[in-house]
Amino acid sequence: MAGFTDIVRAGVAVADSVTATLQAPVEHHAWISEDRRGEPTFAPLIIRQAIVERKQRLIRAADGRVIAVNTKLTFPRPIEANGAADRREPIDPRDKFVLPDGTTGPVLNVEGIVDPDTLTGAGYMVEVWLG
């Protein structure tokens, strides 16, 4: 008999498959460190498929501030950890995403339900809010 985590994983896989034609390629530049001048350095570029929603909305940040967001990226699959030191996984606020039209924005919030069966704390799926 399948456990609840297996059911959720299967449901996310179905959602990924059903929305495949709605997904667009998004560049993910994962932050890994800062150089001697304090400039960010990034891992090699990864192209990820995501549902890209343009929507203006106010959200409450972790520090309590209310901030405006304009894009929500939904990755209907787990995102693997990068493994760099001092990095929040699987998406760090210092990561950079470039949308198909070339626009980008700061990572303002990351949401997702953690899969308890992973050692890395990866989510079943990930939502990223950009400013």
Image (spheres, grey):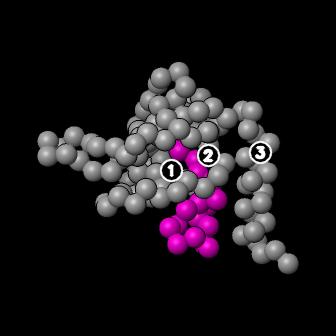
Residue closest to the far top: 101
Q: Is mark 2 on a helix, strand or loop?
A: strand
Q: Is residue 24 left or right of residue 64?
A: right
**Is residue 29 at least partly visible in the picture?**
yes
Nearer to us of marks 3 and 1 is: 3
Q: Mark 1 points at which residue?
A: 110
Residue closest to the far left: 36
Nearer to us of marks 1 and 2 is: 2
Residue 82: horizontal and vertical position, in percent?
43, 56
Q: Does the magenta stretch include residue 35?
A: no
Camera-nearest residue between 46 and 50: 46
Q: Earlier in the sequence, mark 3 or mark 1?
A: 3
Picture quadrant of residue 124: bottom right
Q: In this view, does 67 lie to the left or right of 33?
A: right
Q: Is residue 120 magenta?
A: yes
* Mark 2 crowd level (few <14, some 14–19, many ≥20, 10 Å Cα): many
The answer for how far apart the CA atoms under marks 3 and 1 are is 22 Å
Q: Which amino acid does label 2 sit on?
A: Phe
What residue is drawn where x is 52% and y is 72%? Answer: 119
Residue numbers of the magenta segment: 113-131
The answer for how far apart the CA atoms under marks 2 and 3 are is 12 Å
**Is residue 57 at least partly visible in the picture?**
no
Q: Mark 2 points at which residue?
A: 75
The answer for how far apart the CA atoms under marks 1 and 2 are is 11 Å
Q: What residue type is labelled 1?
A: Val
Q: Which amino acid does label 3 sit on?
A: Ser
Mark sitting on residue 17: 3
Q: Is residue 78 left or right of residue 120?
A: right
